[in-house]
Image (spheres, grey):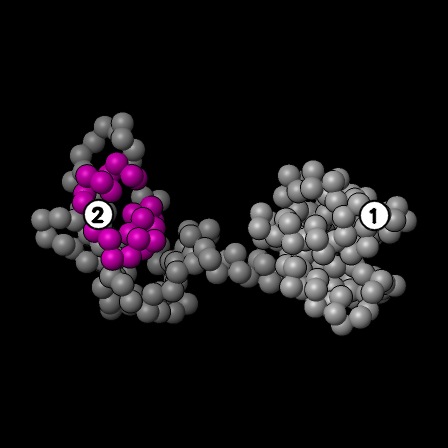
Amino acid sequence: MQYKLLVVDDEPMIQNLLRDHFEAEGYLVYTAGNAGQAEAMLGKKPDLVLLDIAMPDLDGITFCAGIRRHIACPILFLTAKGEMQDKLNGLRAGGDDYIVKPFSMEELTARVEAHLRREERVHRAADQRFADGLVIDYSARTVVYREQTISLSRREFDILELLSMNAGMVFGRDMIYERIWGYDAEGDSLVVKEHVRKIKSKLEAVSGKQYIETVWGVGYRWIRT
């Protein structure tokens, strides 16, 4: 994956230095010399922003506070100010870190990498569900119980995903069929019964536990844990 960085600094020398360095490291780098240019670049959806505090039109702290409601990526302040209050103001405005000029490129690179790794862990965790020993990875479309992978067909995983992401909610066969196969599909919702039976059987064979409950006469639901 190629990460995208947005460098916001009114000094062209700093822009060029950071762009050349991080492009050599494999990043896609966008640059901006002021808050107006930076705001326009946010449409590129950067994975991390390197933001100078001392800018002529709008200082970095004010700019950070204004955009923080709209972007969630890490923001690292680049500042010539080393006073504690400046650092606190930056963090309170929504910054995630700061590095004081002149800075070591090695340290800056390490901090960027650390924040990107953290973001990746957070996003990956958001795409997973842990249920009493069972781990469902929705991005990778895998199901694992205590390091043992449970093989599911595409339709089986689709059904498991629907139920597990809405734990406790009852879904009727017709509703599942429409969600998974589509409203215009030609077939019978009875196929859902067979798919759910296979899912339950595979989960129980490995874990010895029931994760999907049949609500007789109504449908199926993922058991809350």
Instruction: Name the side, left or right, on which 152 lies relative to 123.
Output: left
Residue 185 position in % (x across, y down): 26, 29
Q: Amino acid at mark 1?
A: Pro
**Vertical relation: 136 (above or below) 190:** below
Q: Quick one: SS at disc 1? A: loop
Residue 210 position in % (x across, y down): 22, 64
Q: Is residue 147 magenta?
A: no
Q: Which residue is mark 2?
A: 171
Instruction: Name the side, left or right, on which 166 lies relative to 32.
Output: left
Name, please, the residue furthest toward the bottom. Answer: 84
Q: In this rendered view, identify the residue nearer to me: 202 or 66.
A: 66
Mark-to-mark CA distance, 2 and 1: 57 Å
Which residue shows up at 13% across the image and 48% down it? Answer: 218
Q: In this rendered view, identify the residue nearer to me: 94 or 155.
A: 94
Q: Earlier in the sequence, mark 2 or mark 1?
A: 1
State the image quarter where residue 188 is shown. top left
Q: Is residue 158 magenta?
A: yes
State the image quarter where residue 29 is shown. top right
Which residue shows up at 88% across the image and 63% down it? Answer: 102
The range drawn in magenta is 157-180
Instruction: Name the side, left or right, on which 142 lies relative to 107.
Output: left
Q: Amino acid at mark 2?
A: Phe
State the image quarter where residue 53 is shown. bottom right
**Vertical relation: 177 (above or below) 77:** above
Q: Which mark is residue 56?
A: 1
Residue 31 position in % (x across, y down): 78, 44
User: In which quadrant of the rendered image does the C terminus lie?
Assistant: bottom left
